[in-house]
Image (spheres, rainbow, N blue to C red):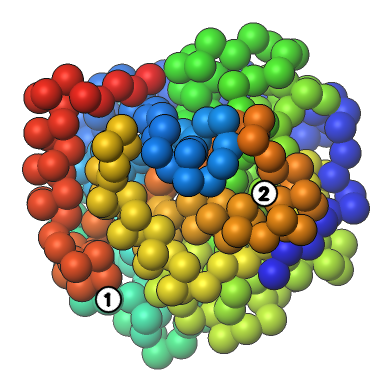
Amino acid sequence: MLIANARAGRAAYPDELRAIMSIERAEQSRRWLAPWPALARGATPLYDLPDTAAALRVARFSVKDESVRSPLGSFKALGAPIALVRQILRLHPGLEPGAILAGRCAERLAGYSVVSATDGNHGRGLAAAARDAGCRCVIVLHAQVSAEREAAIAAFGAEIVRIRGNYDESVAEAARLAARHGWQVISDTSYDGYEDIPRDVMQGYSAIAAEIVEQTGARRGEDGAYTHVLLQGGVGGLAAGLVSYLWEWQGARRPHFIVVEPEQADCLLQSALRGRAARASGTVDSLMAGLACGETSPLAWRFLSGSVDHFMTITDAQAVAAMRALAAGGERDVPLVAGESGVAGLAAARLLRADPALSAATGLDAQSRLLIVNTEGATAPGVYAELVGEPAEAVLARQAARRKAGKITAG
């Protein structure tokens, strides 16, 4: 399903939004996170995939590969950790930001407890940051989170609480536990009275957009390297973090934004139809675990409602096909390990270009330059191997061979 967002406009980034998330604050977050050993040094790769571009009949197709952002395996290493740092600084304003994740404040934080719900990656990022900072971490998991993902979170010392419901019910349970025990919720979704920390999480994601601007040499206020940017949905946090930065950087000349969700977890599309933050119309259960969210973050919606040109949905089967396509690579395309939620942009692009009417509606043609973000690698290795038909290590071996032969170029 594809819908146009009648509220999307072409104007300068509004001052009321800049007061919440800004390039200046994004750069501060980057500086504060940079010393954390759990993050890779330097920017993640920005790959051009010429064979994919040719198959899609577009001028350029690029992938920002967040699977190598951190050993944590996803872009979530940018969100929860910086939100934890900023919340600790609210409580202890005299601390040095860089000292917190280095563990130099652990004695002071020994009695501090944080809690969050997760589909996997956010909880893993929070658990790793809490361990390094020296505070306690409790993670609430819903019924659809795999045992593999649970083990990856617990490996960082987090205490696991399991519930029988879905993601939205796990969010409610985390809030209940926090209120009962005096713990601090570090969540990537906002709700009434809880916006500062989700804002910090989203602002952390803006680092991805900052790197894209640097890697492509885009000039402020001018057309960028891409005409279309396709972003994952979920509760809206990732999309809001990137959209806010690119919108402020390019102003009215921002790219055409398309947000992609699982068809059964379409809370953002439903929000566009209703003109307010809304709930999904389906069961929410999706193979795309990181996008299986039933309720839009109201704070994220404030950024998306006036900037995202189209909202669309894809099927789980389309996501799996995109995973296999990126893993296979091509004569000129680097093989990439992309998890179930990481391929939403490619799945959407393939769907749009297969239908002339959808291409026309979204302005896609032979001159279009597309960007997607691979938000995760094989964060559940067993699931990845089952869906793709080979383990992630085999894909990475082909990638390494291509790199050794000098056949890989990346921004």
Structural crowding at the residue carrying mark 2, measured as other residues with C-alpha within 10 Å and reported as few (<14), some (14–19) or many (≥20): many
Front in this rendered view, residue 151 or 262: 262
Q: Quadrant of residue 36?
A: top left
Label 1 secondary element: loop
Residue 240, compared with residue 2, is above or below; it is above
Residue depicted at 16% across the width and 31% down the height = 402
- Could you tell me which secondary element the residue under label 2 belongs to? strand
Which numbered marker is on residue 212? Answer: none
**Quarter-wise, where is residue 363 in the image?**
top right
Specify whether 15 is left or right of 289. Answer: right
Identify which amino acid the numbered label 2 is placed on: Ile
Q: Quadrant of the C terminus?
A: top left
**Quadrant showing the N terminus:** bottom right
Question: Which residue is depicted at the point 66% across and 30% down?
Answer: 367
Work out whether residue 277 or residue 321 is closer to the camera in this orientation and state it: 321
Q: Nearer the viewer, residue 408 or 145?
A: 408
Circles 1 and 2 in contact, beta carbons < 8 Å: no
Labels 1 and 2: the sequence-earlier one? 1
Q: Please determine whether, in this image, residue 36 is positioned above or below residue 153.
A: above
Residue 339 placed where, x, y %?
Answer: 33, 57
Residue 258: assigned label: 2
Reading the image, the residue beneath label 1 is 146
Residue 323 on image: x %, y %? 34, 58
| x and y, in percent, of residue 215 in the image | 45, 17
Q: Is residue 118 left or right of residue 28?
A: left
The single residue placed furthest to the bottom in the displayed view is 164
Circle 1 packing at 10 Å, graded few (<14), some (14-19), many (20+), is some
Residue 342: x %, y % from top left: 41, 53
| Front label number (1 vs 2) | 2
Q: CA gap, disc 1 to disc 2?
A: 29 Å
Q: Amino acid at mark 1?
A: Ser
